[in-house]
Image (tube, grey):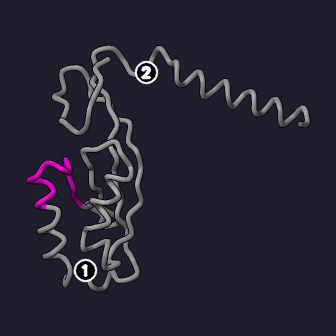
Amino acid sequence: MPRTTWILSFLAATAVFALAQDPLWPPKGTTCGDSVVAFYEAGPNFSKAMEVYPRHATYLGVLLSEGKIAGAGRMKDGASALVITRTPKLEEAQALIDADPFVKEGVVKASYHIWGHCWGAGVPAPDLAPETKK
């Protein structure tokens, strides 16, 4: 391994370790956890949105009432939407979101991200997923 590659690898590994051991984050008194979020962006069949919307809204309404998602909504600029699941497990969240008629019928494309969230001291933390208090 060339010396430059070795040095860069060492620095990257050191940075990852330092972040994992960060004494400043999360701050004391916060409640933290992980949840999968899905961002929706226009898909190849976006023109069918109004036709599919009633099934999409009904499906998300069921997930909300069953407690499988914590929230959902569109961005006010109309560029995308967000679904916050109540699971830290990517496969579980993908199964829920992929069953959404908007996703199934190509109205939107979903991208998935594991969101490491913290809620400030004195802020009631929503029950998104198993949490750890710091």
Residue 71: in magenta span: yes
Is residue 64 positioned above or below 99 on the image?
Answer: above
Query: Looking at the rendering, which quadrant does residue 27 occupy?
Result: top left
Tell me where residue 102 appears, x and y as whole percent: 27, 73
Which numbered disc flags the more N-terminal residue, 2 or 1? 2
Is residue 133 positioned above or below 36 on the image?
Answer: above
Residue situated in front as seen by the camera: 121 or 51: 51
Q: Which residues are magenta?
A: 61-73
Tell me where residue 114 appears, x and y as whole percent: 40, 44
Q: Amino acid at mark 1?
A: Ala
Name the residue rendered at 83%, 37% in the picture.
5
- The circle on residue 25 is 2
Q: Amino acid at mark 2?
A: Trp
- Which of the image's four quarters has the C terminus? top left
Name the residue rendered at 81%, 29% in the picture.
7
Location of mark 1 (residue)? 49
| Residue at the limit of the structure toward the left, as seen here | 65
Name the residue rendered at 27%, 16% in the picture.
29
Q: How many other residues sit within 10 Å of disc 2, few (<14), some (14-19) or many (≥20)?
A: few
Name the residue rendered at 19%, 47% in the picture.
70
- Which of the image's four quarters has the N terminus? top right
Tell me where residue 92 appears, x and y as whole percent: 32, 52
Is residue 53 positioned above or below 62 on the image?
Answer: below
Mark 2 touches mark 1? (CB < 8 Å): no
Is residue 6 positioned above or below 93 on the image?
Answer: above
